[in-house]
Structure formats: C-alpha cells, structure tokens
Image (cartoon, helix red, strand yellow):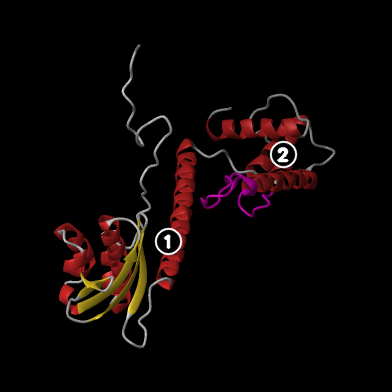
Amino acid sequence: SETGRGGGGVRRGLQLGQVFGVRGKFTWPPGGDVMSKLKSPIGGPNDEPFDRPFEVKTDEEQRLEGLENIERAKAYIKEHITEDMNEDQIRHLVSRAMEACIPPVPSWQEMFMMEAQKKTLKKKGDVEANEEKQKKIQEAGLARVPKIDEFGRAYATGRRKTSVARVWVTEGTGNVIVNRKMMVDYFARMAHREEIFAPLRLTGKPLSFDVWATVKGGGLSGQAQAIRHGVAQALQPFDIETYRPLMKRFKYLTYDARQVERKKPGQPKARKKFQWVKR
C-alpha cells in the first residue's frame, strides 16, 4: 500500500523516477529475489531510513550536498541494475536508491529549529564582531590617554564651542590658575567654577590636584567647559582604571561638538522671523 513508510518511499521513488525517466505508479514493496540481494551503500539494512546528525549548513553547502547525493543515487542504480529486471523492479531500485542516498525532507519542527539556529549563529557572529570593534575602539582610546612627564604633570587640550584650553594637572593642594589668575578672580560666577571642579570632584579627592590652564576664544561659559574637558582628560593617567570609567560615565571625555546655529538671510536670527505684515 501507499500508507505509512511505504507511501513515503513511493513518493520519493516517483520523484527520482522522474529524474531517471521511470514513469507510472507502483506498489510497495514489489517483491522478487533480485531486490532481496540489494545492499545499502551506507552500510545499514535496506529498510533502514537515511539518518544523519542534525547540523546547520549554508545554502551553498546544502546545494553541493544535494548534488553529491544525486550522484551517489545514480552510481547506486548503475551498480545494481540488470537486464532481466522488469519495470516494477526498476522502480523499486530507484526507490531504494532514494532511501539509501538521499535524506528525507525534514519535518516542520526540524526546519523551524534550523532557522532558529541560523539566526542564533548570525546573532552570535554579530555580537563577536561588535565586541571586536569595541575592543579596537578602547585600544585606540587608551593610546590617546595623556602621559605624566618627568615633572609629574599631565597635559591635555580641551575644547568647547570656539574656546580652546590647554590644561596641566599635577598632584597638589587644589589650586586652580586660569590665564595666570586664580580661578575665583577669573570666573566670578559659581556655576563656571563648578564646571571646572566637576571632574576633580569625581575622583573623591578634589583638593589633591593642582590645575594650571590657559584658555582663549569664546565666552566665559565656553571657556569653563573647555577647561573641564581638558581637566577630565589630564586626570586619567593618575589612576586610569578608576578615573577613566568615571569620566566616561559622565561624558566628560567626550567633545561636545554643538555650535551656535548660524544666522539665516531674511531673518533677524537663526530661528527668529520678522513680523509678517499682510498688506
């Protein structure tokens, strides 16, 4: 009959039978002494289904494997076919070649698992590539960390808007000098002083470092933030494993590229419009 295992064999036999020019329907199994002498090329019993471990393969690997299986089936048929075989025996031989050399179509559960495993492998590869990229970025960042010179000073350049600050940091007692003036004399507003002391406060010992800075360009707000940027960079070599993660967490090492938006023609300012008059 064509039910159960026999039905599957019939369908696979018909598929390969069309490839080799064998047409028509047949029953399973058709019997005969010739068929009982055939042996499977994979070493198992004749009625044992094709079996192999579950593995995920690329489309090209699956295509090459399919071509290889077809060639094995052809070789199997050429090896066992004889002139005294009738039509039913030839069909049975084709079915046995299919059963022995070509794996059955996987179930939908197996296909679902294969797709899920492909996505997992792809995601794993993306994660590994991202980790490698992040590692290179960290190595490049560490290469830019300032060095402490023979005088115990760490130098860095800070920028904000149009202000540029050159900053030297040394171990000391908390003195901050800006353009040869004490910080309290140069920056009258407390907010500007807080900007400069923000990275020093993150270290937990703000009065353990001295800062000497020269700054030019921009206004007081931009200059204070430029000095903060330089101080955060110059503090790293004093304890890179502790200070660098702290500075990165609060984004003190990141250059703030925001600039004043330009004035537009036909407008009094960057966004402001002239009053519209209907007549």
Q: Label 2's element?
A: helix
Q: Nearer the viewer, residue 234 or 54?
A: 234
- Circle 2: residue type: Leu
Q: Quadrant of residue 261?
A: top left
Q: Nearer the viewer, residue 201 or 100?
A: 201
Q: Nearer the viewer, residue 237 or 259?
A: 259
Q: Is residue 151 left or right of residue 46?
A: left
Q: Return the residue at label 1.
A: 134
Foreground tag (2 vs 1)? 1
Q: Is residue 206 left or right of residue 253?
A: left
Q: Quadrant of residue 151?
A: bottom left
Task: Give percent across and percent down for residue 204.
Answer: 16, 72
- Residue range (magenta): 39-61
Q: Residue furthest bottom?
A: 150
**Is residue 32 something that shows in the picture?**
no
**Is residue 173 something that shows in the picture?**
yes
Task: Give percent across and percent down for residue 115.
Answer: 48, 42
- At 38% from the left and 72% from the top, the residue drawn is 145
Tag of residue 93: 2
* Badge 2: residue crowd in 10 Å (few <14, some 14–19, many ≥20): many
